[in-house]
Image (cartoon, rainbow, N blue to C red):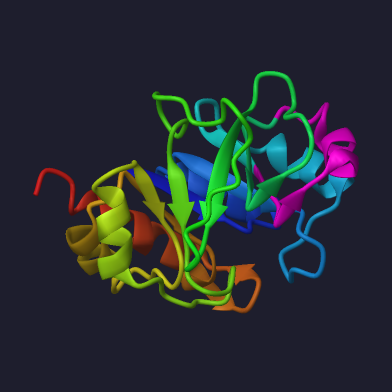
Amino acid sequence: MLVKICGLTTVDHVRAACEAGADAIGLVFAVGSVRQVTKEQAKTLLAAVSPGVLKVAVYKHYAAMDALEIADLGFDAVQAFTYEALLPDGAFALPATREDMVVRAPPGALRPEGFKGCLLVEGAQSGAGVTANWEDVQEIAEHVPVILAGGLTPENVAEAIATVRPVGVDVSSGVESTRGVKDPTLIRAFIGAVRATEGE
C-alpha cells in the first residue's frame, strides 16, 4: 500500500513523514492553498526528503509557468486535474479527479509501474477533509489503480482501504493539528494504521 503525505510545509514535517515510512510526499503549489509553498521553500523541503521517497508537485491546473518554476527541482511526479505543459524531465503525471470522474491526463501519462498508471480520486474539495464517496470510488478501483484521497484520518483509513481496495492512500488535513500544520504524531498514527491493513 502506497502512502503519500501531502501539503508538507516544514523540514521537520518532511523528515517526520519520511521517518514514519511514507512512500511519497507532496508539496502544494496551488495558488491560494494554506499549504502553498514557493520555489525557494520547495528547494529546502526537497533537500530533506529521504532517498527512495517520491517527490510530488501538486497543482490544480498545471500550466507553462508552472513547468518553468519546477523544471530544475527534481520532482518525480506532477499531480494535477489538468495538464497544459510538458512535465519535467524524468517526471510522470499523477492525474487527479473528483466527483465528475473526468480524467484530463496528458497523452502517455498512464504507465504501469509504481504510482505511474494510478488515478488519484479525492473528495469534493482539495485539502479540506471532505471524504470521497468510497462506494463510487470502489467501482473505479475495479478498472484502474486508485490512490484514495479526501477526508482520510488515522481513525478511518482502515475502513476506507477495506471498502475501496486502493493501491495507495493520500492524506493532508487528516494529519494536521491545526489547518495547514502537520502533526508528526498523527503522521505516524496514519501510516501505522495503513501498515496494519497490509496482508489482510
Horizontal side, residue 181 vs residue 135: left or right: right
- As rendered, which of 188 and 79 lies closer to the eye? 79
Q: Is residue 43 positioned above or below 178 on the image?
A: above
- As rendered, which of 25 and 12 lies closer to the eye? 25
Which segment did they paint magenta? 57-74
Horizontal side, residue 71 vs residue 87: left or right: right
- As rendered, which of 44 and 123 lies closer to the eye? 123
- As rendered, which of 77 and 135 lies closer to the eye? 135
Identify which residue is drawn at 40% across, 24% down: 113
**Coordinates of residue 101 in the picture (x, y in percent):** 47, 59
**Coordinates of residue 126 in the picture (x, y in percent):** 59, 68
Q: Is residue 153 positioned above or below 149 on the image?
A: below
The furthest residue to the top: 90
Q: Is residue 148 magenta?
A: no
Identify which residue is drawn at 40% across, 43% down: 21
Identify which residue is drawn at 54% across, 34% down: 54
